């Protein structure tokens, strides 16, 4: 399994970068998780738009889905250029009917996931946890049968993550706030809360993402190290995490 950070800012992207967007790959299959602002531009550094096999959206805030529309246009243009009529599945929850409706276009199809069921997408099995966020949002536990990657999406701290992230090879957390702040009202976590989940859940590695634009982001890692002894990465564009991936 290989995970590539395409976009890692919370709220809005810094110049030349993107908000939430991650590639998860296995055996030539590419799943895109979230499609934030600037994501399509950045994504093309790693993949041709026709080489994306599926997209899944955690929730319908702009910093997680702003580039869905332009991705649809890109698929539309390439469908004509390359005489291709393959439909790209875009998975999303149905608790916001209007946003879900917009996942479907000429060459994309919105497919509702049932958060209470296991979703199979290509080589991946995905289970969901409702997060603590102002709008309905789902974190994901993704396994290829060998390795486990857990994505918190956007969430305030909640104890349910301890069990949901249990023994994951890698946990990627919402780290929109520094330790001295309180992100709970905004529905986000601090560095320390993410690290506490990593420690309690006994994960191998932690990636801090959905980062604040201000301050010294390296400080987030120092704060997290007080609570989690495993390897901690600060998300940046192009960061690759992989395990048992023969191409790496
Ligand atoms: Zn959000």
Image (tube, helix red, strand yellow):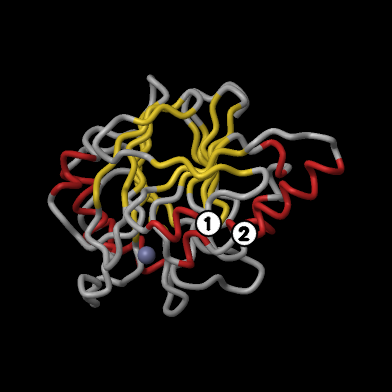
Say which residue label 1 marks.
Answer: 102
Q: Secondary structure at mark 1?
A: loop
| Residues marked 1 and 2 touching at CB (< 8 Å) | yes
Q: Is residue 92 left or right of residue 193?
A: right
Q: Is residue 158 above or below residue 247?
A: below
Query: Which label number is shown at residue 245?
Result: none
Q: Secondary structure at mark 2?
A: helix
Kindly report the distance in space between the C-alpha atoms of the residues bearing marks 1 and 2: 8 Å
- Point out the tag, 1 or 2, that comes first from the N-terminus: 2
- At x 29%, y 58%, the residue is 136
Closer to us: 66 or 76: 76
Q: Quadrant of ligand 1?
A: bottom left
Q: Is residue 191 above or below residue 125?
A: below
Q: Is residue 80 above or below residue 146?
A: below
Q: Nearest to the eye among marks 1 and 2: give it.
A: 1
Q: Residues within 10 Å of mark 1 (few under 14, many from 20)?
A: some
Q: Position of residue 65 (x, y in %)?
A: 51, 59
Residue placed furthest toward the bottom: 214
Q: Position of residue 218 (x, y in %)?
A: 42, 66
- At x 16%, y 56%, the residue is 158
Q: Residues within 10 Å of mark 2 (few under 14, many from 20)?
A: some
Closer to us: 66 or 166: 66
Quadrant of the frame with the C terminus: top right
Residue placed furthest toward the left: 159
Figure disc tally: 2
Say which residue label 2 marks.
Answer: 69
Q: Position of residue 90 (x, y in %)?
A: 52, 43
């Amino acid at each position: 399994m290989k995970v590539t950070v395409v976009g890692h800012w919370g709220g809005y992207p810094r110049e030349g970068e993107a908000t939430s967007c991650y590639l998860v790959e296995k055996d030539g299959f590419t799943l895109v998780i979230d499609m934030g602002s600037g994501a399509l531009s950045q994504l093309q550094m790693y993949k041709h738009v026709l080489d994306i096999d599926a997209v899944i959206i955690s929730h319908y805030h702009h910093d997680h889905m702003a580039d869905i529309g332009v991705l649809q246009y890109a698929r539309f243009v390439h469908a004509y250029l390359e005489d291709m009529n393959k439909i790209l599945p875009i998975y999303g929850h149905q608790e916001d009917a209007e946003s879900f409706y917009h996942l479907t276009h000429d060459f994309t199809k919105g497919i509702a996931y049932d958060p209470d069921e296991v979703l199979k997408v290509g080589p991946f099995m995905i289970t969901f946890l409702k997060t603590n966020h102002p709008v309905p949002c789902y974190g994901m536990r993704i396994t290829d049968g060998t390795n486990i990657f857990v994505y918190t999406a956007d969430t305030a701290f909640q104890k349910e993550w301890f069990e949901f992230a249990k023994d994951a090879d890698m946990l990627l957390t919402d780290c929109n706030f520094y330790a001295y702040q309180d992100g709970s009202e905004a529905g986000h976590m601090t560095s320390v809360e993410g690290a506490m989940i990593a420690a309690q859940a006994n994960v191998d590695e932690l990636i801090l993402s959905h980062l604040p634009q201000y301050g010294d982001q390296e400080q987030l890692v120092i704060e997290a190290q007080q609570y989690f002894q495993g390897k901690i990465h600060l998300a940046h564009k192009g960061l690759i995490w992989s395990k048992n991936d023969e191409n790496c």
